[in-house]
Every structure is written in C-alpha cells, then in structure tokens.
Image (cartoon, rainbow, N blue to C red):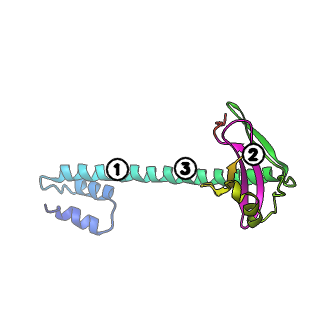
Amino acid sequence: MGQNPVVRRLAGAGLTVSQVVAGASACGADDGKGDRAGAAAAGSAASAKQSAADAKAMADSAMATAQLMVAREARDKAFLTVGRVSFGAAGLRELVAPAEARTAEGIGAGSTVEALKQAYGDKGLALAKNGKYQFAADADGPGWQLEFTVDGDKVSGVALVNRTVKCV
C-alpha cells in the first residue's frame, strides 16, 4: 500500500506522527485512505506513549527496589556490630550475635572462611543461595540453622535463624 505523497513529505521533514497527521488533515491530503491512516497513526502514537509510561514506571520500581536493598544492607551491617533479635508470627525467628561474640569453636566476626570450614565442615556447613554459610543447628525444634555472613574471606556475622518462621 502506498503512502500519501503529502504525508510522506511531511514525515521526511522529521515531523512527529501527530504533526504528520495534523498536516495531512490541514492540507486536505486524502487519497481515500487518509482517515484510516490517520487513525492508525494516532493509535500507534497513543500506544507508544503508553509504552513509554510503562517503561518509566518499571524503571522507577527497579530503582526503588535497588535503594531498598542498599538500605537493608546498611541496616544489616549495623546489626552485625550490636546484634539483634527478630520475631515472626510463630515466635522467635532470628538471633544475630554482636560482633565480639564467638561460637564454641571460636568462630565469629573476623574469623577466616578457611577457619569456618575447618570448624564446621564435618557438620554439614554449606554455602547457601543467599551467599551465607549455614548448617543445621542443635536447637529446640526443626528449622534452626547457624548462619555465617561473610565479606570476602572473612566472617562478618553469626546468627541463629529459623527461616521456616515467617516474618510478621
């Protein structure tokens, strides 16, 4: 299908779709298909505008999520120095030890990952998907794990956690 010569000339001049449609209407350029072409162009312009708005909303959401993750990381680092406790719907969920605390095997903040592996390797120590080393802890009830946060080749935090207890 050929494009109307007036519309083609206007588009070649670097005008927007809206300007081309307006120009075609103002010049009376109509080869019998102008109304449909104009409506299609207007629909395409509206769709492009909506797509741009959707893309901006997704980018804004991704930026907010990234900022939230940075804030959580800063909060978690602060908790590693003083310790914390958190509760879930079913009770105690997590005990984070203060920086100076050590396990019975002498592992704590500042210990090497190698020392961690030597102390707990035979107890099922494994690197979890979240980047923390953990193993099942001897505690009251199932789900409790001893969890070690690492930064490079050093342990930066120790926690006793039960991830089966959901946060409130």
Between the residue at mark 3 and the residue at mark 1, the CA separation in whole angstroms equals 21 Å
Amino acid type shown at disc 3: Ser
**Which residue is outermost to the right?**
100
The residue singled out by tag 3 in the image is 61
Asked if labels 2 and 1 touch by Cβ distance under 8 angstroms, the answer is no
In this image, 148 relative to 61: left or right? right
Is residue 82 positioned above or below 88 on the image?
below
Is residue 141 positioned above or below 42 on the image?
above
Q: Any magenta on residue 21?
A: no
The residue singled out by tag 1 in the image is 47
Which quarter of the rendered picture does the C terminus lie within?
top right
Which type of secondary structure does the marked residue at label 2 adopt?
Answer: strand
Q: Residue at x 63, y 39 (%)?
A: 164
Within 10 Å of the Cα at label 2, are there few (<14), some (14-19), or many (20+) other Cα atoms?
many
Which type of secondary structure does the marked residue at label 3 adopt?
Answer: helix
Q: Which residue is drawn at 49% across and 53% down?
A: 56
Specify the segment rendered in magenta: 138-163
